[in-house]
Image (spheres, rainbow, N blue to C red):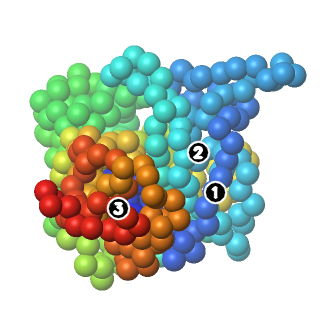
Amino acid sequence: MKFYLDMLKKDEKVSLSLRGLYEKCGYKKYRMSRFEEFSLYAENKNFLGTERILTFNDIDGKLLALKPDVTLSIVKNTKATRQNAEKFYYIENVYRFSQQSKAFKEISQMGLELLGDIGAFETAEVVLLALRSLNEIDSEFVLDISHTGFLQGLFEFFKFPASAVAEITECIGAKNPHDLTAVCMKHGLSEADAAAVKETALLSGSAAEVLKVAKKLCKNQRMKTAVKELSECTDIVRADTLFKNIRIDFSIINDIGYYGGLIFKGYVAKVPRHVLSGGRYDNLLKRFSNDLGAIGFALYLDELAGAYPSEPFSVDVVILYDGTDAGAKLYKEAAKLLDAGKSFWIGKELPRDIIYKRVYKFADGRLKEANDA
C-alpha cells in the first residue's frame, strides 16, 4: 500500500485520504454527469460568478453545458428535509473560464455538502471537516471564518444604498482601509463614522480576541445574531486540536445573494490563493423553492500540483532481463517480491528518473544481483 501511495501526486493523495475521512463521518459520494441542462447554470450565473459556460446541442436540439459546478446539481436533486438531512461529498472535474489564461480549463475539485436543518452542531461539523481537510494538505494552514450578517447589519445601520454597498464591499474584500474611508465619506458618513466602519469591517484575529471586540461593535440585532452564531460554532470547535488554526476575519466577502450566515476560506503555506471556500448557502435553495438549510465547501485540488511537487518515483528493486528465458519464471520472481511487500520495476535497461535500492539481473531462470548495482 505504501508503494502505491508513493506513486500518487499530492492532489491524488489528498483526495484519497479525504474520501476516507468524509465517509467515516457519514457523507456519501455524489456522482453526476459531465454535462447538465444549460438553463440550470444560466439561471444561477451569479452563484457561478461567470457567464462563460461551455455549451453544445444534444441530438434532440436541447442546449447542454459542460458542468462548471457541482453544488447546483446537488441542490437541484436533493431529497433532504428538515427531519432527514443529506450529506454528500464529491470528486469531480468542472469546466471553467480562467481569467489568467483567457481559456477554459478542466479543474479538479473536491467538496462536501450538508443539507437539512442546519444548527450550531451541523455548522461546526462542516468547519471541523474543513480544518481536517486543510491539515491533510499541509500542517501550516489557516481557516478564515466570517459571517455575512455582521457586515449586512453594519450596512443597514448606516443606511448605505446598494451602489455604496458595492463600492464599500470591494474595498473591504481588498483590505484597503484608505479607499474604504474615502468611499464611506463620499456617501455622506462623517470622519468618525467612516473610521468606525473601517474598524468593524476589517476586524480580524484569533477567535477569542475578535469575538470579544465584535460584541462591543455591534450596532443592531443582525450584527448581534452574527456574533452569537460565530461564538456558538467556535465554542464547539474549540475542543479540536486544530482550533488554533482558525482566524476570524470579517473582510471575507462571498456573494450575499446566495450565501447567508457563516462563511470561510482556507489557506495553506505554499499556495498564494485560497484552496478551500465555503459557507451557508440557504439563499440558493430558496431559488429552488426549497426551505432548507445548507452548508458546504469546495477544495481546489488543482492548486496543489505546482506548490506540492510529487516525491521522486522510487522502488525497492530493479530487475533487468535480456528478453530471453523470461516468461513464467520471471513472473514467479515478481510475485515473490509482491508477496514480500517489495516494489519493483522490470525492464531491459536501467530506468531513468526512478530511484531504486537494488538491481538484479534475471538470467538462467533466476535473479542474480548485478555487479554494477
Going by the picture, which residue comes out furthest to the bottom?
A: 239
Taking the spot 33% from the left edge, 22% from the top edge, the residue there is 100
Image position of 121 with respect to 151: above or below? below
Taking the spot 48% from the left edge, 71% from the top edge, the residue there is 332
In the rendered structure, the answer to whether residue 341 lies left or right of residue 92 reads left
Question: What type is the residue that disc 2 sits on?
Answer: Val
Q: Nearer the viewer, mark 2 or mark 3?
A: 3
Q: Which mark is residue 75?
A: none
Give the secondary structure at mark 3: strand
Taking the spot 70% from the left edge, 72% from the top edge, the residue there is 84
- In this view, the residue in front, 188 or 16, is 16
Residue 68 percent across, percent down from the top left: 56, 34
Query: What residue is pinned by disc 2?
Result: 70
Whichever of labels 2 and 3 marks the residue nearer the N terminus, that label is 2
Residue 213 appears in which quarter of the rendering?
Answer: bottom left
Taking the spot 70% from the left edge, 35% from the top edge, the residue there is 36
Q: Which mark is residue 30?
A: 1
Quarter in which the C terminus is drawn: bottom left
Query: What residue is pinned by disc 3?
Result: 363
Going by the picture, which residue comes out furthest to the front?
A: 364
Q: Residues within 10 Å of mark 3 (few under 14, many from 20)?
A: some
